[in-house]
Image: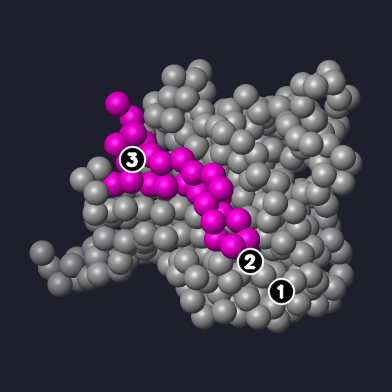
Amino acid sequence: MRRQDFFACISTTLFSTALLSAIFSVAPPAAADEPALERIAFGSCAKQDQPQPIWDAVVALQPQRFLFIGDNIYGDSEDMNVLRTKYALLGAQPGFQRLKATCPVLATWDDHDYGKNDGGADYAKRRESQEVFLDFFEAPADDARRKREGVYSSQVIGPAGRRTQIILLDTRYFRSPLKKTPNTAEPGEGYRGIYGPNEDPESTILGAAQWQWLEEQLKMPAELRIIASSFQVLADEHGWEMWGNFPHERRRLLQLIRDARADGVVFISGDRHLAELARLPADHPDGVGYPLYDLTSSSLNAPSRNFTAAGVRFGNELNSYRVGLTFFDVNFGTVLVDWEATDPVVRLQVRDEKGGVVLQQRVTLSQLRTR
C-alpha cells in the first residue's frame, strides 16, 4: 500500500467514527478496569425549598451512581432566573452536597424541572431550560447534550461480563399533547386520573432523533440495562401521565427492545408520589421474551398524603401489572447487583426515609434474557 493511500484510509476511518459518534452520540466502550456497578440509587420529586433528610439514608448506602429521574426541583416557570434560583436551593441542601461528594450524579428531567406542569414540546422555553439543567448538573462543554435538543444520555459502566448500561430518556422535550378523557372507573375499582390514550399515529414521546439514538444504544453490549423514564412505562390504566397515554409509542418501545434482542432491561420511573413495582410477563402480546420490570420511586421529600388526609384507610389505583403493594411515604429506589453469584442477582428495591427496604423484587440475569 502506498504511503498516501495508507493515510487516506486512516483519515476515512477516523472521519467515519467521528461522524457516527456525532449522529448517534455513541457512548465510548466500557473501560476494562472500571469496577462493575453493584449499588445504584435513584429518586424523583424533590421539593427544593423543604428539608431533605432522606439523603442521610442514600449516602449511608454508598451508591456508586445516583440517578435523578425527574422533578428534581419544582421550577414551573418560563423565567430562567426562577429556575436557576430553585436549582440553587437544591444545590444548597446539605444532603445533596454530601451525595455529590459520595458518587457521580446522573440526571434527566420531568415536567416540573423542565418548567411546565405536564408539559411537552409545547413548553416555550425548553431550549433555555435545557441549558439551565445542564449547567446545574455540570455537563462539560463537549457533552453531546450541549449540541442537540433533549437531555437524554447513556453510559456503559463496568468490565466485559459485568457491564451495566444506564439509559436516561427525555420524555418531555419532544412529547406531543396529552388527551383528556372522562373518568370511567366505577367506585371501588381504583383511583383514576384525567388523561386517556392519544391514538394519533403522528404523536410521540421521544421524537424521531431520540428514537434513532435509542435504537443504537440498545445494540451496545451490556449484561444489565437500566432504562430511566420520568413517568411509568408499564402501568397503563391510572389516567395520569404514563407511556400508556401514547399506546403506539409504548408498543414501539417494547418492540424495539424485542427486535434488538436487548437482554437485561429493567425500567425505573418516578413522578407519581408513590412507589410500586410493575411486571410485564414474558408471554404478554407486547412482551420481549423475558419479564420486564418497572420500579417506580417517588417522592424524595413530598409524600402522597391524599389518602390519610381524606380519612381513607387504604388506597388503590388501577394497575393490572402491579406486583405487591403500593408505598405512599417518602422513599428512594435502589438497584443492587451481586455479580459474584454464579447467576448474578439483581435486587430491585424501594427504601424508606431511614433506608429500610419496604419493597423488593429479586431476579437473576438469566431470567432477563430471551430464550
Instruction: Give the answer, above or below, for where 332 lies relative to 32.
Output: above
Tag 3 residue:
364
Which of the labelled discs sits on residue 341, or is there none?
none
Can you say which quadrant of the picture contains the C terminus?
top left
Instruction: Give the answer, above or below, for where 162 lies relative to 320.
Output: below
| Amino acid on which the number 1 mark rests in the picture | Leu
Categorize mark 1 by other alpha carbons within 10 Å: few (<14), some (14-19), many (20+): many
Outermost residue, left side: 1
Residue at x 43%, y 30% (from the top left corner): 291
Tag 1 residue:
90
For the residues bearing labels 1 and 3, Cβ distance under 8 angstroms: no
Residue 89: give x, y in percent of width and height.
76, 77
Answer with the quarter of the image where residue 43 lies: bottom right
Judged left or right of residue 285, residue 298 is right
Categorize mark 2 by other alpha carbons within 10 Å: few (<14), some (14-19), many (20+): many
Q: Nearer the viewer, residue 94 or 251?
A: 94
Which circle's residue, 1 or 3, is located before the other in the chain? Answer: 1
Is 347 a magenta residue?
Answer: yes
Residue at x 83%, y 76% (from the top left corner): 81
Q: Nearer the viewer, residue 135 or 276?
A: 276
Answer with the quarter of the image where residue 299 lies: bottom right
| Amino acid on which the number 2 mark rests in the picture | Ile
Residue 334: give x, y in percent of width and height.
50, 55
Q: Which residues are magenta?
A: 344-371
Mark 3 vs mark 2, CA separation in Å: 29 Å
Is 188 a magenta residue?
Answer: no
Residue at x 44%, y 19% (from the top left corner): 283
- Residue 176 visible in this rendered orientation of the protein: yes
| Amino acid on which the number 3 mark rests in the picture | Thr
